[in-house]
């Protein structure tokens, strides 16, 4: 398996797509039930293949990621050749990026002395989607990139 198997919740969300995937394998609902019961390793393999197909599709489309914690924000732009990272550090332990009002304060006061910015880029060492997947597994979420774009304009 290239990535990881989708969660039960993710499979439930994608039940229609999974049924279509099985149909491309000439497996109908009745046959799927038999496979699950009589050939669990084959069923597991089908779930793994479908999971990889879904992940590959999602990761290929993912352009921006973000990971927000109490005092740090990591913003990523994932191009075809490199990852551009904006790291934001909050040096005020009385505030938290996870608190709505503190986050709003940050958005309204991005140049406050208690906030530091770092920007860097690196070329992929492994396949792009593998590295993007690793960031997601470490807690990053796919985003539309609004915060990344705003911060990139702000810090240059």
Image (cartoon, rainbow, N blue to C red):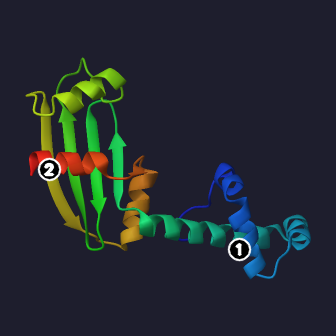
Residue 18: horizontal and vertical position, in percent? 71, 66
Question: Which comes before the other along the chain, label 1 or label 2?
Answer: 1
Residue 23, horizontal then vertical, whole percent = 77, 77
Question: On the rendered structure, is 62 left or right of 56?
Answer: left
The answer to whether residue 70 is seen in the rendering is yes
The Cα atoms of the two marked residues, 1 and 2, are separated by 42 Å
Q: Nearer the viewer, residue 96 or 156?
A: 156
81 vs 152, left or right, is: right
Residue 39 percent location from the top left of the image: 85, 71
Q: Which residue is mark 1?
A: 21
What residue is shown at x 92% (from left), y 70% (from top)? 30
Q: Nearer the viewer, residue 125 or 117?
A: 117
Instruction: Residue 96: tell me if it is visible.
Output: no
- When asked about the image quadrant of residue 111, the answer is top left
Q: Residues within 10 Å of mark 2 (few under 14, many from 20)?
A: few
| Residue found at x 73% / y 81% | 24
User: What SS does tag 2 mark?
Assistant: helix
Q: Position of residue 49 (x, y in %)?
A: 64, 73
**Total count of labels:** 2
For disc 2, the marked residue is 153
Quadrant of the image for the N terminus?
Answer: bottom right
Q: At 10% from the left edge and 47% from the top edge, which residue is drawn?
A: 155
Q: Residues within 10 Å of mark 1 (few under 14, many from 20)?
A: some
**Secondary-structure class at tag 1:** helix
> At x 51% / y 69%, what residue is drawn?
57
Left or right, residue 24 beside residue 10: right
> Mark 2 and mark 1 in contact (Cβ < 8 Å)?
no
């Amino acid at each position: 398996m290239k990535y990881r198997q989708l969660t039960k919740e993710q499979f439930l969300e994608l039940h229609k797509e999974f049924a279509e995937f099985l149909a491309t394998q000439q497996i109908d609902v009745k046959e799927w039930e038999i496979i699950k019961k009589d050939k669990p390793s084959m069923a597991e393999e089908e779930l793994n293949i479908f999971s990889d197909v879904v992940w590959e599709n999602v990761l290929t489309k993912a352009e921006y990621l973000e990971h927000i914690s109490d005092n740090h924000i990591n913003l990523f732009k994932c191009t075809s050749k490199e990852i551009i990272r904006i790291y934001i550090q909050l040096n005020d332990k009385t505030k938290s990026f996870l608190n709505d009002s503190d986050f709003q304060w940050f958005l309204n006061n991005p140049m406050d002395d208690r906030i530091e910015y770092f920007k860097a880029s690196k070329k992929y060492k492994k396949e792009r989607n593998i590295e993007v997947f690793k960031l997601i597994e470490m807690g990053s979420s796919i985003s539309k990139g609004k915060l990344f774009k705003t911060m990139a304009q702000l810090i240059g």
